[in-house]
Amino acid sequence: MNNPILNQIGTVFIPVSSIEQARDWYCDILGLQADGDIQFGHIYVIPLNGTGIVLDSKIYSEHNIIKTPLFHFNTENIEEAYTFMKKKNIDVITEIEHNHYFNFKDPDGNHLMICKC
């Protein structure tokens, strides 16, 4: 059977209230330069390996804040990642669970996860 839909995820959209502040925050925690273009005045594509992330201030509303992580950022050292986020005063909302992952919030309250893979 020929299927026109690929079994791939191209990108994940995250609603943010300020595209400039979100760009700077995400690039900071990911160790990336925040020097890409903001497209159409409301979109910033974070350059990642694999599935991408698009920050979008046009889709932001308090009702669109992500309350359950839809994906996770990978790490090889969960303890080091946890300490890194705490030192940056990131709103870490769980301890390291099962020696494997923890959740945190971005400045808009979107729930995100870091997972040892």
Image (tube, rainbow, N blue to C red):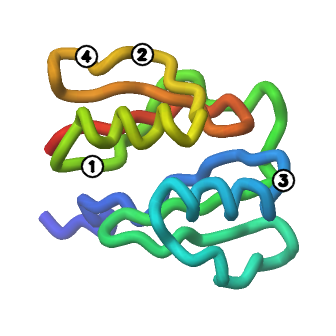
Image point 57% across, 60% down: which residue?
28
Image point 19% across, 39% down: which residue?
116
Calculate the distance from the C-alpha at mark 2 to the C-alpha at mark 4. Answer: 7 Å
Image point 16% across, 22% down: which residue?
99
Residue denoted by label 3: 18
Calculate the distance from the C-alpha at mark 4 to the C-alpha at mark 1. Answer: 15 Å
Residue denoted by label 2: 94
Calculate the distance from the C-alpha at mark 3 to the C-alpha at mark 2. Answer: 25 Å
Dots 2, 1 in contact, CB < 8 A = no
**In the figure, residue 52 lies in which quadrant?**
bottom left
Calculate the distance from the C-alpha at mark 2 to the C-alpha at mark 1. Answer: 17 Å
78 relative position to 1: left or right = right
The amino acid beneath tag 4 is: Glu
In the depicted structure, whether residue 16 falls above or below residue 107: below
Helix, strand, or loop for circle 2? Answer: loop
Helix, strand, or loop for circle 1? Answer: strand
Query: Marks 4 and 3: which is nearer the front?
Result: 4
User: Which is nearer the eye, 35 or 62?
Assistant: 35
x and y percent of residue 117 in the render? 14, 44
x and y percent of residue 96 in the render? 29, 20
54 relative position to 40: left or right = left
Image point 25% across, 16% down: which residue?
97
Residue denoted by label 1: 74
User: Which is nearer the eye, 117 or 28?
Assistant: 28
Residue denoted by label 4: 97
Q: Earlier in the sequence, mark 3 or mark 1?
A: 3
Helix, strand, or loop for circle 4? Answer: loop
Query: Marks 3 and 2: which is nearer the front?
Result: 2
62 relative position to 5: left or right = right
